[in-house]
Amino acid sequence: MEYHFEVVNGILKVSLSGRLVASCSEDFKEAMFERLRESKRVLFNLEKMEHVDSSGLGALVSVLQWMNGNGGIIKLCCLQPRPKIVFDITKVYRIFDIYATEAEALASFGPEA
């Protein structure tokens, strides 16, 4: 799993690529908690995320809960077909704001506060 951080209009965009699975989910959470500490608006672009398993999904949910508890907002975009199956089966899509495109997701944050 690789991630790239970029700030776009005051929003921290985290682009994930590869496989978010058990072997890297703890490292992923630690890296996200460290990096997201100063961010209140975060977009995860999942365009290059090839696969997610239950541990990886749990890591994303942990990050969402942590952000919600610290007054932050997380949104997802560009969910690909294979990971989408896991989101659909587990119905976790109900707790995330998910957008088809990055442009739609960025616009949904509204103006910077």
Image: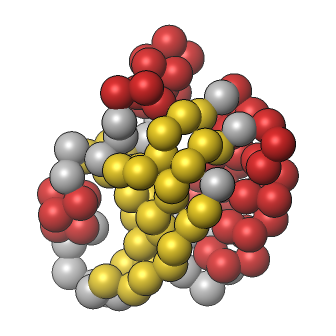
Q: Name which quarter of the figure residue 56 lies in.
A: top right
Residue at 44% across / 19% down in the picture?
85
| Image: 51 above or below 74 | above
| Image: 59 above or below 2 | above
Between residues 91 and 83, which one lies in front from this camera angle? Answer: 83
Give the residue at the far top of this rendering. 89
Q: Tell me where residue 82 appears, x and y as whole percent.
A: 43, 26
Q: Tell me where residue 17 appears, x and y as whole percent.
A: 51, 55
Q: Tell me where residue 48 appears, x and y as whole percent.
A: 41, 51
Q: Is residue 29 left or right of residue 110?
A: right
Q: Name which quarter of the figure residue 9 lies in.
A: bottom left
Residue at 55% across / 17% down in the picture?
90
Which quadrant holds the C terminus? bottom left
Residue at 31% across / 83% down in the picture?
8
Which quadrant holds the N terminus? bottom right
| Image: 28 above or below 82 | below
Q: Tell me where residue 55 appears, x and y as whole percent.
A: 75, 34
